[in-house]
Amino acid sequence: MPLTDILAAALSRPAARVVEVPVRELIHEVLADLAYAGPDDLQALTGRARAAEAAVEALRARLDTAEAAVGALESRVDQLDAELSQARLRTLAAEQARDAALAASALAAPAPDPVVGADGAVVVDGVPYRVAAEHAGQPYRVRGVKVRRVYIDGRAVRKKRA
């Protein structure tokens, strides 16, 4: 390194210090006049940006948790919907079985006993007969294989062809 360079470097350092402070003040004054942010403002904005980033990350974590909960609820709703469909099918099958049982019991239920007419009229196997008029309004039954008899209150009564 030549001697001139060493000499220039030695003299320029103190001169640079003397010039640096007024230039720095001049730059700050120009930035303030133009309403630009200064170093303190930039540092404050950097701190606020970091705080905002941290808040966004916290909210992102909460959002992920909420999305997971919504996903679990959606799957539970789907499961309950499937169970409801199955319950409806079982209910429909039970109602159909009940209706079939009611229809079968209606067919299997014995018909009510016929009633003796006002003038003692009874019908045995489609043939009209008469019994004593005192039995009018009472239920009767017809029994017997070869000889068909009319029973009122468990006792056989005489019948005549009408």
Image (spheres, rainbow, N blue to C red):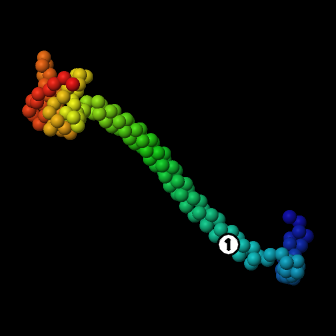
Tell me if 90 is positioned left or right of 157 in this view. Answer: right
26 to 129, vertically: above or below: below
Along the line of sight, the residue nearer the viewer: 25 or 11: 25
Furthest toward the right, the residue is: 4
Asked whether residue 113 appears in the rendered view, the answer is no
Q: Residue furthest top?
A: 146
* SS at mark 1 in the image: helix
Which image quadrant is residue 141 in?
top left
Q: Residues within 10 Å of mark 1 (few under 14, many from 20)?
A: few
The amino acid at mark 1 is Gly
Tell me the residue at 75%/77% (across/down).
41
Residue for point 55% across, 61% down: 62
Does 116 sit above or below residue 27?
A: above
| Left or right: 30 as drawn, with respect to 77 | right
Q: Is residue 77 above or below residue 103?
A: below
Residue under the point 88% across and 81% down = 33
Residue drawn at x 21%, y 29% is 122
Residue 51: quadrant of the picture: bottom right
- For the residue pair 105 and 13, the one nearer the viewer reads as 105
Q: Which residue is mark 1?
A: 47
* Whole-percent x, y for residue 44 in the image: 71, 75
Q: Quadrant of the N terminus?
A: bottom right
**Horizontal and vertical percent position of residue 149:** 13, 25
Q: Is residue 68 above or below residue 92?
A: below
